[in-house]
Image (cartoon, helix red, strand yellow):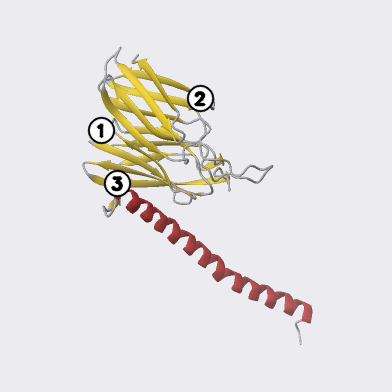
Amino acid sequence: MAIPRRTFLQTTLAGAVGASLLPHVVLAEDAAATTDADKLKAAISEIYGDTAAEVSDKITIKAPEIAENGASVPVDVTADLENIEEITLIAPSNPAPYIAKFSFPNGSAGLLSTRVKMGKTGSITAIVKANGKLLYASKDVKVTIGGCGG
Amino acid sequence: MAKTKTKVRAKLKNGVTQVKVLVKHPMETGSRKDKKTGEKIPAHYIKEVSCALNDTVMMQADWTGGISKNPYFSFNFTGGASGDKVTITWTDNKAETDTVEVEIK
């Protein structure tokens, strides 16, 4: 018996606890990721029906990486596209993901900026409808203090 | 009647008109609770915003409570000349409304 009982317990227990915690963490992250994506999908289909939306690099979202105040997160959307019809803002992690839809019946020069509320850390998505197609881009924002009440 | 105020600026630069709007509005979602009484604060938010250039609708927006308190937004469009009229109108869920007209600078 070279290993004292105390050391043996410490190491084995720590290992056991670590091993049992790890899967949970991974599972939780997976669940959050799918629900966020699911929520985004659900929100898109709620607004636009069955029209498929594609990720586009022509859309740039400017928002702070870390927002200290979730009640007011500045968001700038720039879309390098022609014939922009609509710009919709969605925050999938909010209690009410759909934030706003801006329509431009007579054309837009592809810039929209506003301030939105974010309940917690999550992504903000801008969907741009141009030439009848739906394109979107997302940006992650870390929120220190949520701004949706509760 | 809550006190509301709307400020609008429209600026022409290189053929693109940029409109900036700042509204003084509580934008209550209806899900926030009063910390003292624990009761829910009734929803009070702007639902519709529209912008017209002279008499042509250039922008129409549907909002929810997800827009921040005292909302600010800006957007741009091509066309419009110096001296043209830009009209911003908003209506909230309590049917309060405000219209502001400015000239493009």
Badge 2: chain ID: B
Label 3: few (<14), some (14–19) or many (≥20) C-alpha neighbours in 10 Å: many
- Element at badge 1? loop
Between residues A134 and A21, which one lies in front from this camera angle?
A134
Between residues A51 and A144, which one lies in front from this camera angle?
A51
Q: Is residue A81 visible?
A: no
Q: Is residue B38 left or right of residue B83?
A: right
* Residue A135 badge: 3
What is the residue that sits farthest to the bottom in this orientation?
A1
Label 1: few (<14), some (14–19) or many (≥20) C-alpha neighbours in 10 Å: some
Q: Are marks 2 and 3 on the same chain?
A: no
Residue A40 x, y percent position in the rendering? 39, 53
- Element at badge 3? strand
Q: Nearer the viewer, mark 2 or mark 1?
A: 2
Q: CA distance from mark 2 to mark 3?
A: 35 Å
**As displayed, is residue A27 above or below residue B105?**
below
- Element at badge 2? loop
* Residue A149 badge: none
Q: Residue at x 52, y 34 (%)?
A: B69
Numbered marks: total: 3
Residue A67 x, y percent position in the rendering? 54, 41
* Residue B4 badge: 2
Q: Residue at x 27, y 47 (%)?
A: A134
Residue A65 x, y percent position in the rendering? 50, 43
* Residue A105 badge: 1
**As displayed, is residue B44 above or below residue A8?**
above
Residue A13 x, y percent position in the rendering? 69, 76
CB under 8 Å between callouts 2 and 1?
Answer: no
